[in-house]
Image (cartoon, helix red, strand yellow):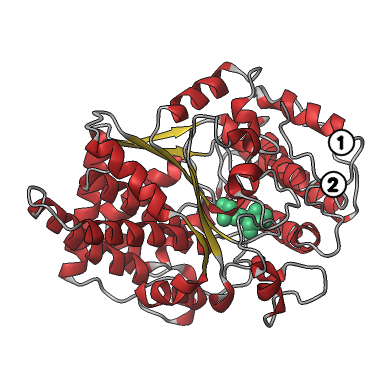
Amino acid sequence: MEFEPMIPTSSTGDKTSFAYETARKRWPIIITQAIDDVYRTTGQTDDAAKREEGKKIVNDLATLKYEVQHNRALPPIPDDGVSDVATYNQILESLGKPTWLNVSWLFSECYLYRRISTFFKLSNHWKNYDIFARQKIKTFRSSRPAVLELAARYKDLITQLRAHSTEPVSEEADKLLFTEMCEICLWGNATDLSLLTSLSYEDIQKLQGSEARKKSEANILVNDLEAVYTQLKEAKKAGKKERVVDIVLDNAGFELYVDLILAGYLLTAGLATRVTLHAKSIPWFVSDVLPNDFGALLNALAAPVPFFETATEEEELQGKVPEKLSDKEKEELAFLFQEWSMLHAEGTLGLRANRFWTGPGSFWRLVDPNAGEQTKELAEDLRTSELVVFKGDLNYRKLVGDGEWDPTTPFTEAIGPLGPGSGINILALRTCKADVVVGLRKGLDEELRAKEGGGGDSGSRKWAWNARNQDKRFSSLIFNTRC
Ligand code: F6P
Ligand code: MG
């Protein structure tokens, strides 16, 4: 069984790719931000031993940045006691002696975050430190207008669903609601911090909100939601008692918030009896959800006044006073908090982390018969699920192995051993932030390349690089049915 596509995969050495730009421009910025963060925390601690270790970590990060920028070889990951080190190092060995600026993009980028995690894991005082936590929660706060808008809509929706739970609702209306919920969840992926290195808060807010959503519908390139709806509806009609939907999370903050909206809706509408959220175990691609981010979001909703109304340092410097929340807004946020914390407490909304999600390379290893016990158990669990929703760009790249697929390749083929026969029902909700795309109708890639900024005949698929660009954020909603 192969665990990477048998075709070329995206490389940081390919001048026409987003991988090329990422390795040379974005990674150094991301590492610099990590250095700033550790530096700041080090300066705030009174514990001398922790301070000393903090300085060492800053030094390790600076060395890593140097290695990347000077195209040094990737050394093996040091043993930090976690079982995935062996897999990382085996793959690294199989790649020869790759250097940062000419290596498989997917492998090296996972390696980058995994390597950073060793600096912390091998310390005594920083083991569970999240270098991106500050950025994540700050961006959630700046999503305030969209958070409030959705809180109001969610409360109305859940109240109505409960009121009408015994009356038959038209199939059409039901399907429409399902579609909208999934689309909200999809577009929540357009704001991820690793792409927002030069974006202002005003820009972040423009990416959210209902107007933006309606306009964006035309930008969905592959939409299989009807088949997904049928799948969930049929299982319900068949009277299956236990119907689980798994969501492999991507980013914290606003994206996690919309994931919870989708989860709450599926449970209330009876389209699932349990939802399991899958988080990462180490700081990952800047904004990905760690278990603590879930707690941080619930805390913000539980105490919205200090969260939204206390001025940040920047606001204080600019003399800005955050607007007060109205009583209605406070009530709507409290409703969300009560709903989600209750679902979580009673176990219908679960949260789990598994090291598999931060492994190297493609997700095809999920069905490796020689995988470790934890991965095997995970795969078995996902097989019993009605639907596994993979959020975001990186999860999509890992599903399709970041291969240089012809864009008309069917999704079911591009996901290799995860396709039909794997026993797993996969839905990918992804806004494009990388080169790889599959499942397009013939000619569409060419049409998009021909549009302004789409890449033209440069050989670059530029239209797919940047989901933050309001007019050019294209996405896929792709579904693979098990059979
Ligand atoms: O930097 C690599 C990358 O996977 C990009 O393709 C994408 O911009 C980002 O990281 C992560 O995106 P997401 O949070 O949607 O997975
Ligand atoms: Mg992410």
Circle 2 residue: 103
Circle 1 residue: 95
Task: Give me the residue at 60% from left, 45% from top.
Answer: 284
Q: CA distance from mark 1 to mark 2?
A: 8 Å
- The one nearer the camera, 135 or 335, is 335
Instruction: Look at label 2 and name its amino acid.
Output: Val
Closer to the chain start, of discs 1 and 2, is 1
| Quadrant assignment, res 160 | bottom left
Q: Quadrant where the N terminus lies?
A: top right
Instruction: Look at label 1 and name its amino acid.
Output: Leu
Vertical position of residue 168 compared to residue 423: above or below: below
| Quadrant assignment, res 144 | bottom left
Mark 1 and mark 2 residues within 8 Å of each other at the beta carbon? yes
- The one nearer the camera, 205 or 155, is 155
Crowding at mark 1 (Cα within 10 Å: few <14, some 14-19, many 20+): few
Residue 271: % across, % down: 27, 43
Residue 282: % across, % down: 58, 38
Label 2 residue SS: loop
Crowding at mark 2 (Cα within 10 Å: few <14, some 14-19, many 20+): many
Label 1 residue SS: loop
Q: Is residue 174 left or right of residue 259?
A: left
Q: Is residue 40 visible?
A: no
Task: Give me the residue at 23% from left, 61% from top.
Answer: 173
Q: Is residue 142 left or right of residue 339?
A: right
